[in-house]
Image: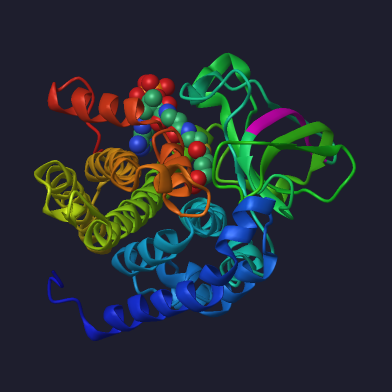
Amino acid sequence: MEFGLPEELIAVRNLAHEFAEKEIAPTTVKDDQEHFFRRELVSKMGELGFFGCVIPEEYGGTDLGFMALALITEEIARVHSAIRVHINMQIGPALALLHSGTEEQKKRWIPALIGGEILSCFAITEPNAGSDVASMAATATKGEQGYILRGTKTWISNAPVADVALVYACTDKAKKHHGISAFFVELNQPGVSRRTLEKLGAHASPTGELTFDNVIVPADCRIGPEGEGFKLCMWQLNQTRFNCASGALGVARAAREAAVSYANQREQFGQKIGQFQMIQDMIAQMVVEEEAARLLIYRAAYLADQKKPNNLEVSIAKYAAAEAAAHAADNALKILGAYGYSTEFPVERYLRDAKSYQIVEGSSNIQKLIIAQDALGYRKANR
Ligand code: GRA
């Protein structure tokens, strides 16, 4: 269903499709198996304007909007979900700067981020602060040269390779979430150490820990006022959650395509296995859940492009898409049987990658909490 997508969006989707097939697909299996991060893919996506579609032209973007972002992201994740992560690593900090940075900060960093010239990441999560963002322990203490940053961030995508990070830390611990501030931090400097973490999937996207041991952050690298970091973080997460939803959709689609293709080829008991109702049941579930997720993502994109609040709609879309991806990959594996379990077919990778979407950027349970508390009238998601 096209929903009357304008030609420029169809063109951008086709561009992303071709890029994914030509530039990502040939090494997907190898990159996944060897846990290899291909830096040039980020540069190429930057050059093609994929990161700039949600950024105004004055900062180097194309301003095509969130619908464009959804279309691009689905195409990339369909071929290799790990490469999707890089979209968020570049646009998350860029959007936070756009939202709360000074004019000087925007001009200084946004073009390089969306051009893929500098590798970026964002650092929220800590060993003891995952879903509960407000409980973070990292501190940024005001000194003569700026702020002194101390603490450890973990499960940070791109931590082993990033040049810069948007770091959230406490400037006034006593004020709890009102004492959190955001900083744009140069990572190639004394006091910053990194440790790579191994994980189930998304192998071609490096993940790790960042430790800040008395790192000096100039005062002009604080993003937004002191104490406004938690709100910026929640705002930013809404943008990057949207991208996760689109990535999960790409995985759900890949799993459905693999299952349909196999069911149309494989013969058992004298007929194509697609003829069996139990296979049809699983394929029907895949189709419905994928379509539903896509429509929910398009609704969230539409609202964002209308400059309307969409936190609730993003949480609904992210929850639906993450669950659809994990369910579709699980069903695809059942349909392919031993071939689904085999590393010679992509379905086991879809399952490994799909599971990440139920965890990252606010777990499925966090999305449900946001959705249910809004429905119950306890806490409005769109404010
Ligand atoms: O009234 P107030 O002044 O105290 O403000 C409150 C509220 O209005 C305060 O924060 C404000 N606030 C917001 N403001 C603007 C809360 N949400 C928003 C918002 N969306 N926009 C405190 O509010 P609260 O509701 O009491 O906060 P809470 O209970 O501490 O937290 C809520 C919640 C659980 C939803 C939140 O902490 C949360 O979203 N947690 C999940 C954390 C998360 O998503 N982490 C992801 C880490 S990054 C990552 O995964 C990278 C992956 C890379 C990739 O693959 O892309």
In which quadrant of the rendered view does residue 101 lie? bottom right
Q: Give the position of the C terminus as an image quadrant.
A: top left
Of residue 299 and residue 167, the one placed in the foreground of this image is 299
At a point 43% along the width and 37% down the height, the residue shown is: 355
**Which residue occupies the extreme top position in the image?**
174
Image check: 187 left or right of 243?
right
Image check: 22 left or right of 370?
right
Residue 22 is situated, as x and y percent measured from the top left of the image, at 51, 78
Tell me the chief SS of the magenta region: strand
Residue 189 is situated, as x and y percent measured from the top left of the image, at 86, 47
At a point 29% along the width and 78% down the height, the residue shown is: 9
Of residue 328 and residue 276, the one placed in the foreground of this image is 276
Image check: 297 left or right of 3?
right
At a point 35% along the width and 74% down the height, the residue shown is: 64
The stretch of residues the image draws in magenta is 146-154
The answer to whether residue 97 of the structure is visible from this angle is yes
Residue 153 falls inside the magenta stretch: yes
Up the image or down, 52 lies above or below 188; here it is: below
Residue 154 is situated, as x and y percent measured from the top left of the image, at 65, 31
Q: Give the position of the N terminus as an image quadrant.
A: bottom left
At a point 39% along the width and 73% down the height, the residue shown is: 63
Residue 324 is situated, as x and y percent measured from the top left of the image, at 27, 43
Q: How many marks?
A: 0
Tell which quarter ligand 1 is in.
top left
In which quadrant of the rendered view does residue 4 lie? bottom left
**Which residue occupies the extreme front position in the image?**
270
The answer to whether residue 228 of the structure is visible from this angle is no
